[in-house]
Image (tube, grey):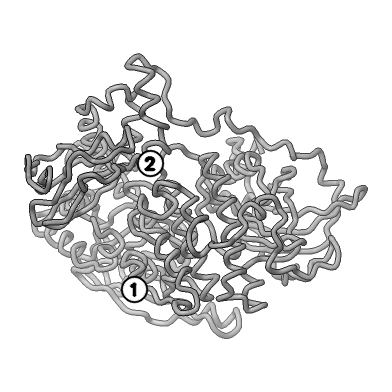
Amino acid sequence: MGAFDEEIARATNMDRETTKTESQAAMIKEAIMKNKYLHDLLPSLSENDINAMVRIAYKRQINKGDILIHEGDLFAEEFFVVEQGQFQFHIAGHTGSDDHKQHQFGFMGECKAGNSFGELALLYHAPRAATVTAAESGLVWVIDRVAFTNIMHQAHRAKMLEYVQVLNNIELFNPLLVDEKQAIAENLYEKHFIKGEKLMTEGEQGTMFYILLSGDVAITKNNKTVRTLQGKKGLFFGERAILKHEPRINGAVAASEDVQVACLSKHTFELILGPLEEILLEGDKRNVSKLPQAGGSTFKPDSSLINVQMSDLKRIGLLGCGGFGAVSLEQHKQTGVCYAMKQLSKGYILKCRMQKSVMAEKKILALCNSDFIVKLFATFKSRDSLYFLLEPCMGGELYATFHKMRFHGHSAKARYYVASVVYAFEHLHERHIIYRDLKPENVLIANDGKCKVTDMGLAKQTVTKTRTTCGTPDYFAPEVIDSRNGYGASVDWWTMGVFIHELMSGHAPFEASSQPQIYQKVMRGVAYVNFPYNRSDPAAVELVKAMLVHEPNERLPLLPGGTLNIKNHRWYRGFDWEGLWEGRLEVPYKPQVKSMTDISNFKVKESDIPPQLPYKDPGDGWDKDF
């Protein structure tokens, strides 16, 4: 075992047997190689990655009747390769009474020696889809998710170090501080060109800088080659495009069958650090980073937080529920003002390991002050629960409204709601908050018909990339599925493309019967998506395709111009963005809300609330600042 593998073993408390014969290692490697789902989900999985997976795999003896996986397990973290034995997959029945369901287990298949299962557990905490039982005694090799993730991140860190070393050799970037160069390296993205394809055109306005990773590139002048960059990793060109938006002096053409480069646009550079010209004016003696600091002093918590006590409120009715708890409509006893109160079960929070995300949700809600985002007014806590007191939107969920009113395919309505979300995203991204959970269920219609984004449970404030795989599978961006290189606010614009498609067609573009199939479709891309509104609204199709671009940096709002690229898109021709911002644009639908206590747009009963998990205080004070 190598030094890095030993480090992983220590970090994950692996007091486990990883020693294996050459034939066992070859068998594990072959099983990984032929796991189609794994390679569909991680198309860039390299041979080095697979060899590292083989090295960290540890042995587990299995007895007949042992259960390796329980259906519905929320915290699956193991991928299995079978050396000996036979393992059967069963899934619980989903028809009949609850009593019958407990005893209906359908046989779904089996896994024998030389094969593998449980690959989703390597990516994120997806609930297990079936129960896996040993039909006979056997031997399996296990790859732990934490160790696998560390392998992937180590490879990414090595690549970032190479990029930083190249940036160190570029005189133009000498004034950049170490953390600034690291941030630039994180935002470089790789692109392939085939022989004869142009990377730069002489005389065009330069917007992109390149680092050569493999292949040959011919630098041209007047359509003649003046020099050739030959396959040496780390050569760079086009760097002045980051400094000035000026015509290219030279062109660049792929001179070999396949050319791979890492590239960065002037637009992306300035989103991260601001104009390079300003940095150069400050000179080489800079010591304060241009990187924004998450949670810094630029944005303060919203002053709309109020002094109200739980004892001042009385429950009017239920607005929603789930394993987390419930959302209720509450009325202030003295003033008559109504609020939505979101209750979170502490037992559920602990079971799902959501302590940090719940505390982050409070902070993020307090930082937001937008007419397009549900406002936070107060927070409370009790022995068993946490509470958010929020702005009520009594028109109901956008999802329910579109299905009830059959609004799918109504372009004018979709335009209005999408535009509102664009303003919400601008507000969040300005505060370095990634939302990560856009879907019609998380957009609420207010009493007056305006719409607001709600539920910051998965939102994260960060100035660097994050790697957590979370959200709604139908809305996952490719970089969320394969999160080894991390991702930023680009994922929100991907979800915007999915959101538009769902409003226009009634279903998500990558819809499938299982999560692995959804992920396969996402990785295949938008070229395979069916657009039922192609004839009725081709401009909407064009906008969706411009959002569902596999490369994050090439999605429409990430190109030079930012969100103006959406606002100026032909789908929005004639749309009154200023009127929407100022609140005077006529809403496309006014919900029926008879009074501030009318909950008729929410179809939930008290009996729908599932039994809540008991809470045992771990004693670490995780909720002391709530």
Vertical order, 290 against 110 (above or below):
above
Point 51% across, 34% down: residue: 294
Image position of 338 with respect to 531: above or below = above
Q: Amino acid at mark 1?
A: Tyr
Amino acid carrying mark 2 in the image:
Thr
Mark 2: secondary structure: helix
Question: Which residue corresponds to the image point at 60% horizontal and 79% vertical from the top-left?
Answer: 98
Check disc 2: other Cα within 10 Å, few if <14, some if 14-19, many if 20+.
many
**Residue 165 at x, y = what percent?**
21, 30
Task: Decide if residue 13 is on the left or right side of residue 250.
Answer: right
Mark 1–mark 2 contact, CB under 8 Å?
no
Percent x, y for residue 499? 51, 64
Residue 15 in view, yes or no: no
Disc with the residue nearer the chain's start (1 vs 2): 2
Taking the view exactly as shown, the residue that stands out farthest to the bottom is: 96
Residue 528: image tag: 1
Give residue 142's quadrant in the image: bottom left
